[in-house]
Image: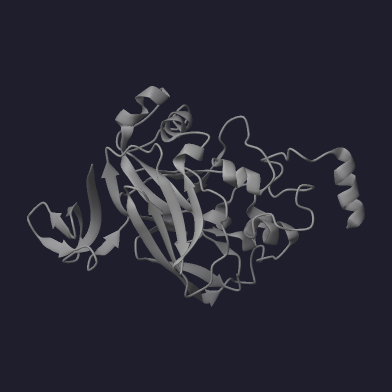
Amino acid sequence: MTEFRRILLDGSAVQVERHGDVLVAGDGREVGVDEAHHLPPSIPRSIIAVHLNYASRTEEFMTKLPAAPTYFQKPVTALNSHGGAVVRPEGCKWLNFEGEIVIVIGRTTRNIAPSQAADYIAGYSIGNDFGLHDFRDTDAGSMLRVKGSDTLAPVGPGLVTDWDFRGKRLRTIVNGEVRQDDTTDHMEWDMHYLVADIARTITLQPGDMLFSGTPAFSRPVEPGDVVEVEVEGLGTLRNHVVTGPVPVRTDVGAQPTESEEVVSTALGGDWEFRGIRTPSRDLYPSTVVTNDVVTTAKEKK
């Protein structure tokens, strides 16, 4: 395995190779890993993320996986890096972490079989698919502001080639406390399947990123919190949460909300109607919803 990183070196974006605690540029310049100003490991044209993929996540919401993966896009303007600040806009409070493994495309990819996907992958990195659930009531379908607001897609610290994704542990740690802990063995669809699935109808370009899903226990974080995502063989992605410098404007658009849907999703479905009306039930029909139960829930309201 080889790890490459993109850093800011003497004012320019430079690709470097990691050798222990030192990053080495092609011209021989060196910088310590901890002193480097990191950039995202690639420059994507598209950032695509899968909704549900880990068994623990579906169990948490008392739902089931769809027959095939479903996806959403994060704008490239959401891209952030290792060490970068994740902004929670003033007036919002439901910002959740989601530790994930990120697939980085290495070649133009279109209409391939899963068995061919490895040849089209440049390598793997770590991502944190932050979600601003305050906008879930208005953007639940597109996830545009929920998952696509500025800074909500940190990826890094590097790009690791020839990494075997099978049987690898993923952990998310907040202020030193482990919050998510799972392995890739519990993914329904592996990395090769996801790439081949997307590339049936969407051309993937070199540098494009595909977030592969998060395990259970995504929860809100606060300004001042330090969030780390550790993946076996890929290292640690570290970010800190800050408050946005200005509030969300109130003279245009839908405003942040704090509905049952927002709060229940942010807190993992732990609410009075859990199992009766699950978050995003149009996307992921609950295994326990029946007409009688839904009627009862409406009557309770």
Q: Picture coordinates of residue 198 (x, y %)?
A: 47, 33
Question: On the picture, is 282 further left or further right than 290?
Answer: left
Q: Quadrant of residue 71?
A: top right
Indicate the quadrant containing the C terminus: top left, top right, bottom left or bottom right.
bottom right
Indicate the quadrant containing the N terminus: top left, top right, bottom left or bottom right.
top left
Q: Work out which residue is located at the far left of the displayed protein and give it.
A: 28
Q: Residue at 29% across / 47% down in the picture?
A: 159
Q: Picture coordinates of residue 193 (x, y %)?
A: 45, 30
Q: Quadrant of residue 39?
A: bottom left
Q: Picture coordinates of residue 291 (x, y %)?
A: 87, 39
Q: Residue at 27% across / 37% down in the picture?
A: 162
Q: Residue at 28% across / 45% down in the picture?
A: 160
The total of numbered circles placed on residues is 0
Q: Work out which residue is located at the far right of the displayed protein and give it.
A: 299
Q: Is residue 296 above or below residue 90?
A: above
Q: Picture coordinates of residue 195 (x, y %)?
A: 42, 33
Q: Residue at 38% across / 23% down in the picture?
A: 115
Give 118 or 144, whichever is nearer the viewer: 118
Question: On the picture, is 267 further left or further right than 85?
Answer: right
From where the camera sits, is residue 52 visible?
Answer: no
From where the camera sits, is residue 177 visible?
Answer: yes
Give 259 or 189, whichever is nearer the viewer: 189
Question: On the picture, is 11 further left or further right than 55?
Answer: left
How is the protein colored in the picture? one colour
